[in-house]
Image (cartoon, rainbow, N blue to C red):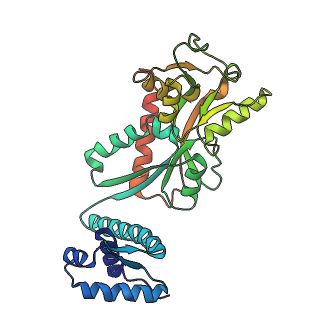
Amino acid sequence: MRDLDLKSLRLFLAVCEHQNIKWAGEQEHIEPSAISKRIAALEQALGARLLLRTRRGVQPTAVGQALLEHARSILFTMGRIEHDVSAFQGGMRGHVSLVASASAIAESLPDDVAGFLRQSAYRNINVDLEERLSVDVVRAVREGRAALGVCWDSADFSGLRHRPYREDELAVAVYPGHPLARRRSVRFKDTLAFDHVGLPPAAAVHALLRKAAAECGQSVRYRAVVSNFDAAFRVVSAGLAISVVPRQVGEDQARLRKVLVVPLSDAWAHRRFAIAYRSDDDLQPAAARLIDHLVRCAAQAASPA
């Protein structure tokens, strides 16, 4: 198959969005007949029909729908490339792709990144922050799909460099009236008699809790499994289960919902995050400055007031 033409993809996208070739032509300032020729060329190159004519206009076929999704992604990427290149010409210092675990994003990382971007010295740096499971954070950095990754320092950083970031503690979120609600602290073992709500099995905290329960000769009894901490707190506040969560996140939620937070007394409940990257030689200046800023934020947070 020959290379696909970006102009043809853009026109195909316009036709699908408007569901009308004439309206797409008006948007793109091109004759409808020219659009039809380009789409016909696309169909010939792909060896499949892309559009169906209906009473309501045109609709993508199954193959056309697949092409449409790829076209959106390709055109978005091309737009970012054009933006980044033009920005460098205007003096931009860099663009940093950062992936992080749910725990890191739920706590202080977004605030630390925002503090970095607010500094006048870094006004020409862009940062993309995306949430991933811990195992995917490390994989994305190792495979070069992200410049930096933030997750627990218990992750497998083989082949990568990493620097310490912030610390946190795990706690148990419970609803008022729960038997654990009046405790000042609680052992994880004592929570296993109750229903839990937790994150998916691929999440690092899920594996940690499964291991801790196994060491007690028990297992975690999940009433529900949800995709993020916000959903977990909703289940807890409804009085359906308890949940092991980052203490800072729990205390923030306690001010918004009917939730109480009881610290875990187990030694493993104290955790540290790390910032992972491929190597010092591969590190772009913008990413290096962001790492230094995050490390400083962590050091200031750890210093006595």
Identified at 46% across, 36% down, the residue is: 106
| Residue 14 pos. (x, y %) | 30, 72
Determine the image quadrant of residue 89: bottom left
Q: Position of residue 95 (x, y in %)?
A: 37, 58
Query: Residue shown at 59%/56% (left/top)?
Result: 139
Name the one closer to the observer, 205 or 231: 231
**Can residue 59 be spotted in the picture?**
yes
Q: Residue furthest right?
A: 217
Residue pushed farthest top?
182
Residue 264, quarter of picture: top right
Q: Quadrant of the C terminus?
A: top left
Q: Position of residue 202 (x, y in %)?
A: 63, 46
Q: Is residue 188 left or right of residue 72?
A: right
Horizontal side, residue 261 vs residue 221: left or right: left
Q: Nearer the viewer, residue 36 or 254?
A: 36
Q: Residue at x 69, y 19 (%)?
A: 190
Q: Is residue 99 above or below residue 48?
A: above
Q: Is residue 278 visible?
A: no
Q: Is residue 80 left or right of residue 247?
A: left
Q: Is residue 213 above or below residue 148?
A: above
